[in-house]
Amino acid sequence: MSPPSSYSYVFSLPADVEETFRLFSDPRLLDKLTPSWFELKPTSGFSLPLAPGAEISYRLRWRGLPLRWISRIVDWEPPHLLTYEQVRGPYRSFRHEHRFEEVAGGTRVIDEVVYRASAGRPIELFLIRPDLERIFRHRERVARRILGTRTPDDRDRLGAPPRNASPCVFRHSLIR
């Protein structure tokens, strides 16, 4: 089996860590934090209080393909950590860790995804990776609209990546 790929996205928000954690951990808001082209439709677990072992299931469309996805919460440490893993879905494995760190004037949001794609490497590089970037950029934009915005100088003060740097990092064991 091929080694897993990983993807990281880091940004800062001008809101306290508790408020930021509530936004990203409320399963009822997942459809707002997900781009409309993903056509995310909840099927169960969206009203449950989250805790380790809780499962959330939904239907979605990826590039027109209808998919079912079931996620299980594996780490739940409010307001600093939320991790879920795919139980059933399009990946061989998928783990998404959300970390929230207090920084001066707000919260740094750190998303780490580790996955094994079911498709081949070209699909991963030319479709999956660009879609992950689009999804996480969308999430940042929506979170900024909901929790407020800051100027680029404030983002630097909050510890966001420099203005000329991309907030995204993609790692694959075959890419050095």
Image (tube, rainbow, N blue to C red):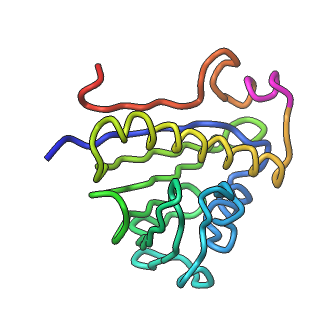
Rendered location of residue 99, percent (x, y): 53, 49
Is residue 155 highlighted in magenta?
yes
Q: Could you tell me which residue is drawn at 73 percent across and 23 percent down?
A: 156
Rendered location of residue 147, percent (x, y): 82, 52
Q: Could you tell me which residue is drawn at 45 percent across and 68 percent down?
A: 67
Is residue 115 highlighted in magenta?
no
In the image, is 125 to the left or to the right of 33? left
Q: Could you tell me which residue is drawn at 86 percent across and 28 percent down?
A: 151
Image height of 36 relative to 129, above or below: below
In the image, is 149 to the left or to the right of 61? right
Q: Quadrant of residue 3?
A: top left
Which quadrant does the C terminus fall into? top left
Q: Nearer the viewer, residue 97 or 116?
A: 116
Image height of 132 relative to 53, above or below: above
Q: Main secondary structure of the magenta part?
A: helix
Q: Which residues are magenta?
A: 151-156
In the image, is 117 to the left or to the right of 43? left
Q: Could you tell me which residue is drawn at 70 percent across and 55 percent down?
A: 20
